[in-house]
């Protein structure tokens, strides 16, 4: 699991306790209660395209009289609610599911879509990573894998909308796809976009901060006036936004690489570099849980630059 709202809530409660805003005995009581129910929400963006939030990466969707398409599937519980809602919006059913990447908070709910969709689409590296990772973790039986894979680009038409899945090389993982609803001019970035959150960089799967920086610039340039859907955002920040947010995140990742590079050049140890308290120029990026931290992203930058 990469990031979920429960992790975030736990972290927030601990952070509040640390500031003295919430007293520790209260936190103890809260921990004994069952976790709050997960709130799910459908929101329209435009031209029958919208998003669904629950737990895990933001789901994008197209729901038209001719059928529906979902982008990403979160986890089985919230995926079931998404399937139910999309069936209500599109009486002809859900034609297909596209995954932007292999992580469990984007593919874990594929099994809930499997009985109702004809096709699951993934970029070929994403498909390989999904199979390898779940086999290694003994969770293959709970998965639903791709029926269609593509290398650089793939497209389909549903009603009067044209949908594209494009691959720009490694970024957050070795196999992230950018999904474009051409007429609606809405682009789903998956986890190539974290809004004001320190991202995970999945180096073992082939991720690259360097290429991530250039792909954000390419995508922002190609879809200048689009509305983008982001995989994740800091609490209180939107999971959609304009192209300039991609360029802001590009600048953040550039600052991460520069910081690690300067540290290596000046002879700092890995501990000194990754122990930074803040990233100069980007104090607005927050941590979440144990994985999405400044230390985490700086460690990835250090390793990508060849530091041991
Ligand atoms: Zn994610």
Image (cartoon, helix red, strand yellow):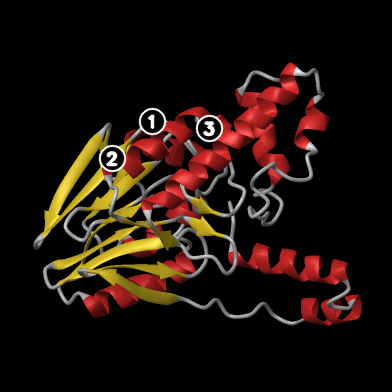
Q: From the viewer's side, name the closer residue of 300 and 263.
A: 263
Q: Residues within 10 Å of mark 2 (few under 14, many from 20)?
A: many
C-alpha separation, residue under disc 2 versus residue under disc 1: 9 Å
Instruction: Give the residue displayed 25% in from the left and 80% down from the top.
Output: 88
**In the rendered image, which residue does mark 3 sit on?**
209
Q: Quadrant of residue 215?
A: top left
Q: Quadrant of residue 15?
A: bottom right
* Residue 166: image tag: 2
Q: Position of residue 287 (x, y in %)?
A: 68, 54
Q: Residues within 10 Å of mark 3 (few under 14, many from 20)?
A: many
Say above or below: 231 vs 137: below
Q: Is residue 220 left or right of residue 117?
A: right
Instruction: Kindly state the secondary structure of the residue where label 2 is placed.
Output: strand
Which is more N-terminal, label 2 or label 3? 2
Q: Is residue 15 left or right of residue 159?
A: right
The residue sitting at the left extreme is 160
Instruction: Give the residue displayed 9% in from the left and 61% down from the top.
Output: 160
* Residue 169: image tag: 1
The residue sitting at the front extreme is 281
C-alpha separation, residue under disc 3 versus residue under disc 2: 18 Å
Say above or below: 43 vs 160: below
Q: From the viewer's side, name the closer residue of 220 and 48.
A: 220
Q: Are marks 3 and 2 in contact (CB under 8 Å)?
A: no
Instruction: Kindly state the secondary structure of the residue where label 1 is placed.
Output: loop
Q: Is residue 192 visible?
A: no
Q: Is residue 23 left or right of residue 5?
A: right
Specify the quadrant that holds the C terminus: top right
Say above or below: 36 vs 94: below
Which is more N-terminal, label 1 or label 3? 1
The mark closer to the camera, 3 or 2, is: 3
């Amino acid at each position: 699991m990469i990031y979920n709202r429960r992790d975030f809530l736990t972290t927030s409660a601990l952070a509040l306790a640390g500031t003295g805003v919430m007293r520790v005995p209260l936190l103890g009581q809260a921990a004994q209660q069952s976790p709050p129910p997960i709130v799910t929400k459908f929101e329209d963006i435009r031209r029958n395209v919208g998003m669904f939030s629950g737990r895990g990466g933001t789901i994008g969707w197209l729901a038209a009289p001719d059928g529906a398409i979902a982008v990403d599937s979160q986890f089985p519980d919230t995926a079931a609610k998404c399937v139910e809602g999309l069936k209500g919006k599109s009486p002809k059913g859900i034609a297909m599911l596209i995954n932007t990447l292999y992580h469990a908070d984007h593919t874990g709910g594929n099994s809930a879509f499997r009985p109702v969709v004809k096709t699951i689409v993934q970029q070929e590296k994403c498909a390989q990573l999904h199979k390898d990772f779940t086999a290694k973790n003994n969770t293959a039986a709970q998965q639903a894998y791709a029926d269609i894979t593509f290398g650089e680009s793939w497209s389909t038409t549903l009603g009067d909308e044209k949908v594209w899945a494009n691959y720009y090389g490694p970024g957050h993982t070795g196999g992230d796809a950018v999904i474009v609803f051409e007429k609606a001019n809405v682009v789903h970035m998956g986890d190539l976009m974290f809004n004001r959150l320190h991202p995970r960089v999945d180096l073992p799967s082939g991720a690259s901060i360097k290429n991530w920086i250039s792909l954000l610039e390419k995508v922002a340039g190609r879809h200048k006036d689009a509305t983008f859907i982001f995989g994740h955002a800091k609490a209180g920040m939107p999971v959609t936004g304009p192209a300039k947010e991609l360029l802001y995140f590009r600048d953040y990742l550039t600052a991460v690489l520069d910081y690690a590079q300067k540290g290596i050049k000046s002879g700092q140890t890995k501990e000194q570099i990754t122990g930074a308290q803040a990233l100069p120029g980007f104090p607005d990026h927050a941590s979440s849980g144990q994985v999405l931290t400044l230390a985490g992203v700086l460690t990835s930058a250090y390793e990508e630059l060849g530091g041991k």
